[in-house]
Structure formats: structure tokens, C-alpha cells
Amino acid sequence: MSRQNPNFRDAVVESVTFLDSTAPPRWKGRVQLPGEHRPIDILIFNLQGEFQAVPALCPHEGCDLTHCPLLNENILVCPAHSRRIDLKVSELCVKELDGQFLVSLNTTSLFETAENRTEITSGSEGFETVLQLREEIDKLRLATLKQEKQIRVITQSMDAMLSESEQQKLKLKEKVHQQQALSRFVDRVMDTIDDLLVVIDTEGRILRLNTAVERELGLTEAELLGTGIDELLTPLEQQHLAGQLPGLPWSIRSVLLETIRLNGYYAGEHELLGKNRDNAKSIYWLKSSLLHSEQGKLEGAVVTALNITELKNRETQLQLSAKVFENSSEAIFITDPQGTIMEVNAAFCSITGYERSEVLGRNPRVLKSKLHDKPFYKRLWRSLLDEGGWKGEIWDRRKNGEFCPMLLSINAVTDKLGELTHYVAISTDISHQKQTERELKQLAYYDVLTSLPNRSLFKNRFEHEICLAERNNTRLALFFLDLDHFKNVNDTLGHWAGDCLLQIISTRIQGCLRKTDTVARMGGDEFTIILPGLTGITDATELARKLIDAMTKPVQIKDHTVFVGVSIGIAIFPDDGNDFYTLTKHADTAMYAAKAKGRGLFQYYEAGMNEAAHQRLLLENALRLAIEREEFQLYYQPKADSSLSRITGAEALIRWRRPGFGIIPPDRFIAIAEETALIIPLGKWILKTACLQAKIWVNQLPGFRLAINLSPLQLLADDFIVVLDRILAETGTKPEWIELEVTEGLIMLDIVKATERLHQIRERGIHVAMDDFGTGYSSLSYLQKLPIHTLKIDRSFIMAYTNDPASSEAAFIRTIVSFGQVLNMTVVAEGVETESQLTLLQSYGCDEIQGYYLSPPLSADEFQRRWIDHGVVE
């Protein structure tokens, strides 16, 4: 582009910055003027497609215009003195070329800024004169602006002073209104008080009073103001107060004021004189305290008076009423509404052993025997509050600690308004009646010879236990015991020896039972036992053996040593019957069957559960022998990564090779092993055998890890860690070669102890896996705190998948996999049997799989040939 005028030239704008936070956005840069040492800052605007530029500093006072807004889209307003700069008449012409801004400079123009005024020499004296005139005009303008500022400051200061003065006036006026309102409020408060309230000065003259004074005394405010407070007291009371004062070095104007001033506070009972001074006097309780100013100067005193005439009358009535019951033969005591004992009679002291002074002011809880529970007392108080009385039997404790049965009657006493004032209790000692009842009950429900429950009481308890068992969904066992050879003792030594033998036998039976069990003598040499709270029959079997062992021991009867035995029949509720008579009959039948087999035995009733119990007993005995003979064998089921590229390890699974029965799966005997604690020696054998096998396979297949299941008894046993360390040392097994699996249910049995054991296991470098995840009750908040390496999805969730990736079963599997990934755990899916299950698990990113799709459990030799020697997944 050629210049049309020789006085214009193009200059490049340097240091350009785009300011997008201003309104409107603009560019800021620098341009070097010809003949100047310093460049000037300019602002560039895009106005409707054309670029316009102005100096960045106001030419008047040099104020920065960088962030000033535009008015009417082309006017910049200086924030200092509101000078307007029109962009459309700017002498700076801007154009954009190749991403740069060029400014066309008029060499004859004058750019003025507050920072630097540039003089352009034109070679003529007239131009210099114009410049000088402009400078003078600028100076005058600056001087004028300074004066305007000073005037503005003075004006603002005067306005502020006037405003502050007005505010002070308003505050003073508001304070006066507040004080007046407060005074009226205090008057209203004083008048709402039922007590008499009087304010006196330092001379004892009345300055202020409430309407209660006028109402009670019948004197007007005008009659009372300025009179002495002592004039309201009787002459006798004035003399009494004066007599209590010490000698004072000044004249006494008011004995009441001096009494208050002497002590700083005064309270006492007085009569106050009203307008009609001949009538009966009212009794008031006076309370008073000194009144001081904010500076601490004494200004007088405040006196309040409460009319207690009615209270004094009631006190007299109570004193009279106390004599009415003083000579009663029944224990009587009176309490206030809060239960504090106010009065007792002589009979109360005689029955309880307490002196009157020992119980007054105390709560009747001093007699509490602690034989009653909280609901008993709740019912008692509910009857008192709702019905105004209670009557019934209660056990108290005498002062010497003896329990005392009482027939107690409590009644609430109210005033005319129905307000509770007292409780009156009348109690009769019924110790003699209770003793008679106990003797009758003992004869009716207990065996005289052994003091055991008889048939009638046993029946009641048994029916009660049946109700509890039905409610709690548990079993109970009924034992029927019959002594063997008891008739021989009776016939040879006499009935006295038989009686002694029954007493000794009853003691032995009780020594074998729990506190919750019940034993009764049905008659002759027959005993019955209730064994409640059963989930299986193991406890019943153990008790039967314990009883047989106890009964076979010799019995010493004076100089005679006798030997007896016992035959026991057992019936189980609800399997063998649902009522007392049926179960008793079945237990009796089983007892005779035991006698028929040779005596000294126990026998379950022949139907239903006893057959299973018999088989279970046989299996338990065979299991004990199997552990001694080591009839067990470990099978191994491989685990592989979900891509089936390699074998990662295996899980050791127990099998029982029972002679004559073949291989017995673990679900047939593990539960019995755990109930009988045989799992402890069996678990040690499994752990040791698996460690030895792991050592062999790890040397052939690096990275191989063998998983071993732990039972609850095994993990929570006190010596488990010691046993684990010993087996690792004996077998030479490194901790990283094995993985110990626990279930959710195991951990929740004792979360604290289980967590501690798992931490001890992990500290040794052994991997920990949670087996059957999703079937227990563990909290996710607990799970993330457990030292778990591996999460195994229970096979039931995998088997539930129906080849539908959109199903809820698939979503649940995905949730478990995601949960394990979030907790940085290895996720293993158990029970994988189909390709669709494998495909689903692969899509979710499951780490490893285990199941029949890969391989069934194999013996050690088969596992060696198929997976260790072969080494790959087909």
C-alpha cells in the first residue's frame, strides 16, 4: 500500500497483548515515535471491521485507560476526570498485515501524554507559540481541577460532620425511648409477680412497689411511698431484729435495712401489717438483698415477700395427721411427689429395722431388694400416675439385709385442685404367709427325698420349653433314665440304702447338667431330663455318655460299696413328638430298648431322627479311626488365567477313601468333623500334605500357588499360628507358595480375632483368599479393611447365569468383579463349566477361573501328568 501523503509513515506495533477480559476486548502494544527515545503504549480496537488506536495513557493526567469501557461503542472515558476520547477521530490509523499491526504516523501531529509530551519541531516560531499556549492552558486546567478537588473534599467533610451530628441526635432520642420502654417493661414485670416486691432507699423508705403490695396489704401506692419499711412489721418483730444487731456507730433509721446491710442478704418469716391492723395477720417469707449502683455505691435494698399462711396451716395439719397412724400395727410411710420420705410410723421402724432419723429425707429405694426387674417398677409407677394408686406384693430388704415380703398399698394424695402433694404407703409383713406357701409348693412340686422337681413341675417346665423351642426354631431332647440293679440294693440293704442311693444319684446327675437343663424324679428309680436349645444331637449324645460314665462309678453307702448303672432313652422334639405325653412315652420306649441291648447304654427313639443319629454316630466313630489310619487323600483342581494361557495354581480338596464304601465327598463328613473338633487334627494333616505337594510343583512350575481351605475352628484356635509356622518349617515351604482360603461366614464369627489372624498370616508372606464371596454377611466396609489378596466368586452365582449378558445374574457377577478390581484384588470365578460363562467373565476382566470347564479335581499323580508335565492349557 503506497502512501498518499509524504507526511505519513508506517510503524510496527510491538509487544502486542490481547486483552479478552475487558469489554470490549482490545489489543495493547507499543509504537516508537520518530525522534523519541521511549515508545508509547497504545490501545487498538476493532470497530465494525476497522482498527482504531489511541494512546493507552490519558493525555491530560496520564491515567491508564487500558481497562476503561467504551461508551456508544466509540468513546473512552478517563476515570480520573471523565475526559472523553473519540476513537473515530483518532489520529492513529491502524492496519493489519501478515499478523502484525502497522500504525500510519503523521509526522506533523502532536501526541501528548501525562508521562511525556513530545514536541514536533516544524521550523516556525508560530507553532512554538501555540505549544506554549497549550502548556499554559493545561497548567490552568490542572490548577482549577486541584481547587475543585479541595472544595469537594471540604464539602464532603462538612456533610459527614452534619450527618454524624444527626445520627448522634437520633441515637440519643432512641436511647431515651429505650429507657422509657425499659422502665415501663420493668413496671409490667413487677406487677405480674405474685410476690410482694418493695424497693427501699438507704434510709429504709419505700421508693417503689408492685401492685401485689397494694392488693395484699390494702394500702395504696400513695400511702406507702416515702414511709419506712419497718412500719409494716409488728413492734415485736422490730424489737427482735433490733436485738440481733450489734452496736453501731450511727443512728439506726431502719432495723430491717441494717439487718440486710449487716449480712448482705436476709431471709426470714414475718407478719406484715395491712390497712386493717386488728384482723388476723398473714405470714410471709421475706427475702431481701442490697441494691448497688453501677459504680458500687449503696442505693438501698430490694425486699420480696411470699405469703406462706396456707403452707403454715398445711404444716400444722400434717403434724396432726402424723399422730393418727403413729400407733398403727402396719408400716406406714409418707413421701412427697418426688418420693422423698417425709414421715414413718413406729411399725415401719419395727418391721424394717431402720430408725426414723435414718429414713427421713431418703428415698424408699433404701428398702429395694433388687429382686424385681425394671418392668415391675415401670408398671407400679404407671399405675400410680394413671390411676392414683397401686396394690400388690413386693419384696423389700430390711436394714440387716434380710428379704421381707410385703403386701403394699400406695395411694396418691392430691389437693383441691387435683395437684399431687404426697404418696401414702401402707405395707403388711407377709413373711409368715410366704413361708407357708413355700412349704405347700415344695410338697406340691418337688420330690421330698431328692428335692428335685416332681412329675407335675417337670411337665410345666417341659411344656414351657416346647413353646420356646417352637418360637426359636430349635430342638430339645427328653431323657428318660432308669437305674440298673436298683432293686437289688433295695432288697439286700433295705429301703434306707435305696433312699441314700437315690440322693447320691440325683446329685451326680445335676453335676452333669448345664444351668439351663432340668432334671426331675418321676418316681422310684426313674429320672427325666430336659435338654433345651439344640440345633443337632451332638450335645444330647455327649450328655448321655457323661451320665453313663457318672452312674457306673461305685457308690459308697456307709460301710457298703454298691455298683449301679443307668439305661437312657432319648426322644427329640419335634422329630419324635410335639407334646409332653408323646415324647415321654417315646423316651420311655427307647429306654427299654437300651435295657434290652444289655443295659448301661443309651438309645434314641427308633423313628426318624434316631436312625440318622445312629448313622451319624457310626460315621463319627469311623471318622476318628480314619484320621488315625490316614485314610484321606487330597485332590487338586487347577486354576488358570481367564485367557487360558497358563496355569496359575490349584485348590487342594479333601477326599475320604473309606474301606468298603469308596470315596466319600467332604460334604458328608466335614460338618461332623467341625462339630466334634476332629477338624483340628484333620486340618493339620491337610495343611502339611498340601505344603509338601506345593514344594514339589513350584520347583517344576514357577509362579504356581496352592490354595488350602481353613475351617473356623482351625483359624480361631489359639495355637494356629504356632502350628502354621511349625508346618512351614518342617516341610521347607516358602510362604508365597501357598494361599489360605477363608469364607465370609468364618470371618463374621469373630471379626476382630479373624482379622488379627489374617494379618498375622499376611505378615508371613502367605496369600489370603476369601472363598464363596457373596454368600455371607460381611460388610463391604469390613472387607476393604481385611488383608485379602484374592476374591473368589461363589460357584452359585456362576451357575445361575443363563447365557443372557443383560440378566441380573450377569450384573451381579460384574459387580463383584468390579468390586475386586477397585480393591486391587485378584478375582477368581469358581464353578465355571461352560464357554458362555467363560466368555462373560473374560468380558468383565475376571482374572482367573476354576471349574469343570477347565478340569475336575484330580489326584496328585493325574494332576502331575495333565498340568505339570504338560504345562499348557488346551
Image: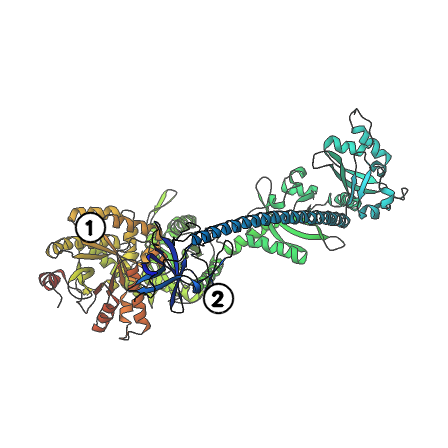
Identified by mark 1, the residue type is Pro
Residue 115 is left or right of residue 626, and the answer is right
Is residue 475 visible in the rendered image? The answer is no
Calculate the distance from the C-alpha at mark 2 to the C-alpha at mark 1: 83 Å
Instruction: Tell me residue 193's x, y (percent).
Output: 75, 48
Question: Picture coordinates of residue 442 (x, y %)?
Answer: 52, 52
- Marks 2 and 1: which is nearer the front? 2
Secondary-structure class at tag 1? helix
**191 and 646: which one is in front?**
191
**Which residue occupies the foreground of this view, 110 or 195?**
110
Query: What colour-coding does the image apply?
Result: rainbow
Question: Which residue is more in the foreground, 235 or 675?
Answer: 235
Judge from the rendering whether residue 511 lies leftward or rightward of residue 72; answer left or right. Answer: left
Q: Position of residue 829 (x, y in %)?
A: 24, 65
Q: Are marks 2 and 1 in contact (CB under 8 Å)?
A: no
Q: What residue did someone put label 2 on?
A: 72
Q: Earlier in the sequence, mark 2 or mark 1?
A: 2
- The correct choice, above or below, for 631 with respect to 282 in the image is below
Q: Position of residue 794 (x, y in %)?
A: 28, 65
Q: Quadrant of residue 344?
A: top right
Disc 2 crowd rating (10 Å Cα; few below 14, some 14-19, many 20+) is: few
Assign the C terminus to one quadrant of the image.
bottom left
Q: Which mark is residue 735?
A: 1
